[in-house]
Amino acid sequence: MASFKSVAVIGAGAYGSALACAARRAGRDVVLYARSPEAAIQMQATRKNPKLPGVSLDGDIDITSDMALAARADIILLATPAQSLREAATALAPILRPKTPVIACAKGIERGTHKFMTEVIAEAMPEVTPAILSGPNFADDVARGLPTAVTLAAKDERLASDLVQALGSSTFRPYHTTDVRGVEIGGAAKNVLAIAAGIVEGRQLGASALAALTTRGFSELARLGRACGARSETLMGLSGLGDLILSCSSLQSRNFAFGIALGRGEPPNREKLAEGEFTAPVLIELAASQNVDMPVSSAVAAILSGKVTIDAAIEGLMARPFKAEE
């Protein structure tokens, strides 16, 4: 088993700070990198992150704006938003040791390139070993040490297992898999479907409609996953069905909250990034390339682009031909 004694988290937002807390509970030496020197100094002094109210950061977590210091760690967790991941990876690439495991913690598909997060890492950092962390969890729960389970995927099963052993604790339970693409599709697609669920909630269409939306959304997520070579157990697991259920039912989900605002006809909160907004058009392009029908995701993309109104999109979904269950 590989010996991973230290972890660096790149990105000191709410989720990055929460992952730093989890890694420290697992007994690792932890460095939390903040791009802003002022933010790093303030967090180091106060042991607080304004984005995680009520949570104190362990005194042994080293908070810094020195990326070279973070690059010395045995494991790197990239906790930046999906659309900023390439920038962070490019900055890290020249100063990391070869074969360092770099774990993407963002759920999305890169705009323009249509690449998944591990593909972005492999392209920007060809000397490292990419992996992906995903699953049903919120930053506040992770930071507070509430029971959480996630999925960690890497192409090499031994490495995935070793990473799980290094990051897991009594309250943070990672499961490992080699199905990297399955984990990435589940994480990206559920963000789009959570926006759809939020629209249903915001429109007050009822619990029955929300249940139907969630199950039909999972059906199309699974179709895309299978077309892209994902394994059924991954799609049915934490990073697929589990993540979708959580994201479509809690106001802690930024995508769900974004959809609720849309459903109510209110402007969404732009201070909190909803990855599904950027993922939706890319996801349906990927689906089209695989000849996969994703009507719910397509409706979300059309609403976001202004091509249809919410009412027209709902009417279109309800008017689709009757068909057998999938």
Image (cartoon, grey):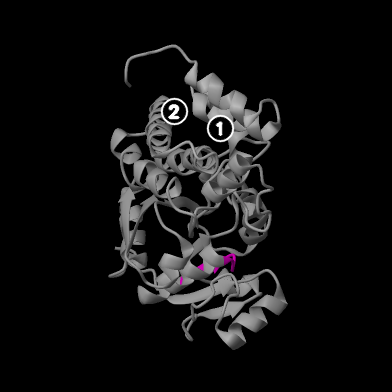
- Residue 62 shows in this picture: yes
Which residue is denoted by mark 2 in the rendering?
224
| Residue type at numbered disc 2 | Leu
Q: Are marks 1 and 2 in contact (CB under 8 Å)?
A: yes
Spot occupied by residue 247 in the image (x, y as percentages of width and height): 45, 48
- Determine whether 151 is above or below 21 in the image: above
Residue 183 placement (x, y as % from top left) = 41, 43
Going 68% across and 36% down the picture, which residue do you hit? 112
From the viewer's side, name the closer residue of 306 and 117: 306
**Label tally:** 2
Magenta run includes residue 10: yes
Q: Quadrant of the N terminus?
A: bottom left
The part of the image, by quadrant, that contains residue 65 is bottom right
The magenta segment is 7-13
Q: Earlier in the sequence, mark 1 or mark 2?
A: 2
> In the picture, which quadrant includes the C terminus?
top left
Q: Residue at x 50, y 16 (%)?
A: 319
Q: Residues within 10 Å of mark 2 (few under 14, many from 20)?
A: many
Seen in the picture, residue 162 relative to 257 is either above or below; the reply is below
Secondary structure under badge 1? Answer: helix
Location of mark 1 (residue): 283
